[in-house]
């Protein structure tokens, strides 16, 4: 007679993954029902981006995979909007790729922003236009390290800031000013993690 086995309990890793997914859902479920001015919209977007960066740190530690934050701008009928995209380092291919699965849902727009200034390791970094290479989804990476049908090498997209598997973050400052000019926020990353502060505090 064989003895039945009792079901195993959840491991710590499984519980952390559940918490991570719940955090993603909560960040994506921020209500947008109330009419907002530019400053309010920017504050909400900045808070969301901070939360997602913290979640990316947890994901990087859990999976042992570097995660990347890519910022780009999009032109639509003469209007400029700023967007972010999460990326993951594919060690088998030796390049950055658009993050898959749940992370794809974390591409988004930084709403309410009129001006965006990025500095990495103390040096200014240009926020480029999104790539629109043939066969690539807007804002994604696709086959950007290969040549197109005209023999021209497509642009290889890389993140401006990296969240390492240790949980440390590239030293960066992202200064965001609302379209109405009433609010400036600075999102920063360093080896101690990420933080969000008022622009006036940053200038002190």
Image (cartoon, helix red, strand yellow):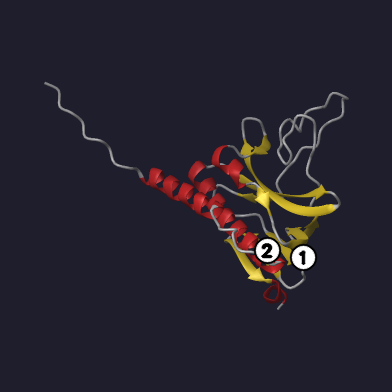
Instruction: Decide if residue 66 is in sight here.
Output: no
Instruction: Decide if residue 197 is in sight here.
Output: yes
In this image, 166 relative to 112: left or right? Answer: left
Q: Are marks 1 and 2 in contact (CB under 8 Å)?
A: yes
Q: Quadrant of the C terminus?
A: bottom right
List x then y, in percent, for residue 20.
47, 49
Which residue position holds label 1? 179
The answer to which of 40 and 66 lies nearer the viewer is 40
Q: Which mark is residue 80?
A: none
Query: CA gap, disc 1 to disc 2?
Result: 9 Å
Assess disc 2: are there few (<14), some (14-19) or many (≥20) residues with their C-alpha within 10 Å of its C-alpha: many
Which residue position holds label 2? 42
Q: Within the image, what quadrant is residue 118 found in?
A: bottom right
- The relative height of residue 1 versus residue 170 in the rendered view (above or below) is above
Identity of the residue drawn at 82% across and 27% down: 147
Numbered disc 1: secondary structure: loop
List x then y, in percent, for residue 19.
43, 50
The answer to which of 176 and 11 lies nearer the viewer is 176
Q: Within the image, what quadrant is residue 184 found in?
A: bottom right
Identity of the residue drawn at 66% across and 54% down: 170
Identity of the residue drawn at 39% across and 47% down: 15
Q: Which residue in the rendered view is the most extreme toward the top?
A: 1
Q: Which residue in the rendered view is the most extreme toward the left?
A: 1
Numbered disc 2: secondary structure: helix
List x then y, in percent, for residue 103.
58, 43
Assess disc 1: are there few (<14), some (14-19) or many (≥20) residues with their C-alpha within 10 Å of its C-alpha: some
Q: Earlier in the sequence, mark 1 or mark 2?
A: 2
In this image, 30 relative to 81: left or right? Answer: left
Q: Quadrant of the N terminus?
A: top left
């Amino acid at each position: 007679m064989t003895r039945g086995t009792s079901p195993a309990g959840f491991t710590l890793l499984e519980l952390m993954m559940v918490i991570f997914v719940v955090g993603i859902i909560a960040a994506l479920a921020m209500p947008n029902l109330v009419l907002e001015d530019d400053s309010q919209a920017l504050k909400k977007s900045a808070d969301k981006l901070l939360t997602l960066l913290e979640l990316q740190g947890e994901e990087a530690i859990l999976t042992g995979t570097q995660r990347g934050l890519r910022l780009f701008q999009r032109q639509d009928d003469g209007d400029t909007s700023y967007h972010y995209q999460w990326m993951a380092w594919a060690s088998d291919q030796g390049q950055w790729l658009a993050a898959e699965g749940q992370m794809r849902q974390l591409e988004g727009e930084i709403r309410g922003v009129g001006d965006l200034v990025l500095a990495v390791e103390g040096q200014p970094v240009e926020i480029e236009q999104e790539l629109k290479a043939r066969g690539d989804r807007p804002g994604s990476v696709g086959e950007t390290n290969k040549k197109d049908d005209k023999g021209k090498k497509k642009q290889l997209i890389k993140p401006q800031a990296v969240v390492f598997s240790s949980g440390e973050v590239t030293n960066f400052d992202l200064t965001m000013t609302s379209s109405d000019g009433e609010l400036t926020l600075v999102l920063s990353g360093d080896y101690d993690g990420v933080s969000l502060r008022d622009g006036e505090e940053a200038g002190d």
